[in-house]
């Protein structure tokens, strides 16, 4: 019997066939920490007298959750990461570089890798056919110091996507819809594997959006086969040599297969306070919104900014609705500047912040006030996520978010916002 | 290991943002973390909780962020054990790694109330609601994880292995 993508990658690492449910100890290729989870991990390594990185060039310490730091405790946390990098040769990705998951796909993750990161959205790199999964500080600390980790070989949930997205509908709408169907724990402990004709046509940015939110259904990672699109993406990032074709065997065994047809899929939102509380944008329409956030590891890429800018160009934000745009990485920022998108945003009344996690983590860059409603392109709308338990977060696509900023209330972007202005 | 304490009962999808909000992740001091544990969902929790108490919850406990400060904060409040219908996977690993006993046991949460006296027998995987006089059987701990727990967490486990 053949292997799923997850089984294949783990088997390559342990040098024998593996079956779901089995616990294996395996080598890891890339390890990552961020400024929220990193200090705890590094502190433990110090206590154990294990301040070392066995693979320093593939050990990356990201300063992205508080970038630039809004308070001295977090500035001190950054010092811990920088000093570990100096001591071990690990890579310090400083506050100007961007969100860890975006930086990992741009420069570090490759098909067939096992990548562990102390951040739940580490699953994003699964779109490059890497077994990428989030763990806690201790797990990743051990991975950094020993180059090894333990894994339970997951069962695989296959998602077969067919059909064509209609105009104004995109991968984010699909993923919100899927999580609504599966529930917030529908894929717990499982790898999700995305396939089908609609997936083959998707660009990498859309694939990253799907992989990124696998964890919101409980998934361990969100995997895609490496194909010509993957190769073109890696070449664009200047590392075409990292490409290799990799996919599941045709006779792989899946625990569950879900067929989704995106024909007729509508712009979708997740209403407060859980990601699986989904409905169409039309059903949520009319809800007044005080802040719109476009950014994050889910939807802060150049393709997302292009969609948002195409709607905002020549239009203005509603006077009661603040608009914050946060490019996901330095590369994205420079590209958006070169294409004139930053000008479009500022002219439409947005504030464009520096790169990083921004408002999504609720410590700076757009903390909500009491009773306020935010429409965000991020991946989580939990109680208090954006820094205030008395606020409400709706998750949406870049198109829905941009149209909402103009309308001042939740709207379906197809209601007159997709036609270019000016 | 046997624990006996009062239940603090919660529903499903208790996420790590409510267990310990991101704004509190400016410290790694367990006591400081504990002082904010669950405050966004239940600001009485920290006043009510006593050493040895037990959290009883529904499905998907600990979903969301990978922050290990979540089980650390719970442990530092004095909670002896979390019994839930199911756990999100990163939280599950984290709890074992830092030595917070957890048990998957469907059914307990459905019938328990806050303040019930609960006894957990970790070795036998048995949960008893003493107040309601009911016994539940939990899923057994996989052997590999039992080893980590017995060693007192992943760090000590690895140190022991490296020392061999």
Image (spheres, coloured by chain):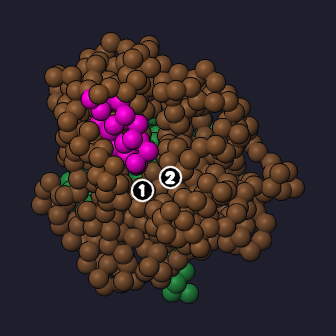
Chain colours: A brown, B green
Q: Where B120 sits versus A48, above or below?
A: above
Q: Can residue A401 be seen in the rendering of this structure?
A: no
At 17% across and 67% down in the image, what residue appears?
A76
Which quadrant does the N terminus of chain A fall into? bottom right
Q: Secondary structure at mark 1?
A: helix
Q: Between tags 1 and 2, which lies in front?
A: 1
At 26% across and 62% down in the image, what residue appears?
A96
Q: Quick check: marks 1 and 2 in contact, CB under 8 Å?
A: yes
Q: Position of residue A246 (x, y in %)?
A: 70, 61
At 41% across and 25% down in the image, what residue appears?
A418
Q: Position of A163 compared to B111: left or right?
A: right
Is residue B155 magenta-colored? no
Query: Please, which chain is the residue tagged with disc 1 on?
Result: A
Q: Tell me the magenta residue range.
A: A293-314
Q: Position of residue A22 (x, y in %)?
A: 71, 60
Q: Position of residue A78 (x, y in %)?
A: 23, 67
Q: Which residue is mark 2?
A: A124
């Amino acid at each position: 019997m053949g292997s799923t993508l997850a089984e294949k990658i783990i088997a390559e690492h342990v040098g024998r066939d593996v079956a779901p449910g089995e616990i294996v100890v395996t080598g890891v290729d890339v390890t990552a920490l961020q400024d929220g989870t990193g200090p705890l991990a590094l502190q433990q390594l110090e206590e154990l007298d294990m301040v070392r990185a066995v693979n320093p060039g593939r050990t990356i310490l990201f300063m992205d959750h508080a970038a630039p730091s809004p308070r001295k405790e977090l500035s001190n946390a950054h010092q811990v990461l920088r000093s570990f990098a100096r001591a071990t040769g690990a890579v310090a990705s400083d506050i100007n570089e961007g969100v860890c998951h975006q930086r990992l796909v741009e420069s570090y993750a490759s098909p067939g890798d096992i990548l562990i990161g102390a951040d739940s959205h580490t699953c994003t790199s699964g779109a490059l056919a890497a077994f990428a999964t989030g763990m806690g500080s201790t797990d990743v600390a051990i991975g950094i110091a020993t180059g090894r980790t333990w894994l339970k070989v997951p069962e695989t949930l296959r998602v077969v996507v067919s059909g064509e997205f209609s105009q104004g509908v995109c991968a984010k709408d699909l993923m919100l819809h899927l999580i609504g169907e599966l529930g917030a724990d529908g894929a717990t402990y499982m790898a999700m594997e995305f396939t089908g004709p609609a997936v083959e046509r998707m660009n990498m940015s859309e694939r990253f959006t799907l992989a990124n939110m696998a964890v919101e259904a409980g998934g361990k990672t969100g995997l895609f086969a490496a194909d010509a699109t993957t190769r073109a993406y890696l070449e664009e990032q200047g590392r075409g040599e990292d490409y290799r074709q990799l996919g599941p065997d045709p006779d792989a065994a899946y625990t569950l297969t879900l067929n989704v047809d995106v024909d007729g899929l509508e712009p979708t939102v997740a209403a407060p306070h859980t990601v699986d509380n989904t409905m169409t944008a039309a059903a949520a329409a009319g809800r007044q919104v005080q802040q719109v956030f476009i950014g994050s590891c889910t939807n802060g890429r150049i393709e997302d900014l292009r969609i948002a800018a195409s709607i905002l160009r020549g239009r203005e934000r509603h006077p009661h609705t603040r608009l914050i745009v946060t490019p996901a990485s330095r590369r994205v920022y420079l590209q958006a500047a070169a294409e004139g998108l930053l000008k479009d945003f500022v002219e439409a009344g947005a504030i464009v912040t520096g790169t990083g996690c921004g408002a999504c983590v609720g410590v700076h860059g757009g903390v909500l006030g009491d009773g306020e409603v935010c429409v965000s392109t991020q991946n989580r709308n939990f109680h208090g996520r954006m820094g205030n338990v008395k606020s409400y977060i709706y998750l949406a696509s870049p198109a829905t978010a941009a149209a909402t900023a103009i309308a001042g209330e939740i709207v379906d972007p197809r209601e007159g916002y997709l036609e270019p202005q000016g | 290991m046997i624990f006996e304490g009062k239940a603090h009962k919660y529903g499903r999808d208790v996420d790590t943002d409510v267990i310990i909000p991101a704004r509190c992740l400016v410290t790694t001091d367990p006591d400081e973390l504990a002082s904010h544990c669950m405050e966004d969902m239940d600001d009485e929790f920290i006043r009510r909780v006593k050493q040895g108490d037990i959290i009883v919850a529904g499905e998907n406990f600990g979903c969301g962020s990978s922050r290990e400060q979540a089980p650390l904060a719970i442990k530092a409040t004095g909670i002896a054990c979390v019994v839930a219908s199911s756990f999100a996977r990163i939280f599950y690993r984290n709890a074992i790694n830092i030595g917070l006993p957890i048990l998957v046991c469907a059914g307990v949460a459905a019938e328990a109330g806050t303040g019930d006296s609960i006894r957990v027998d970790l070795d036998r995987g048995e949960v008893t609601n003493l107040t309601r006089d009911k016994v539940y059987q939990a899923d057994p701990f996989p052997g590999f994880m039992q080893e980590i727990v017995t060693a007192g967490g992943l760090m000590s486990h690895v140190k022991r292995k490296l020392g061999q």
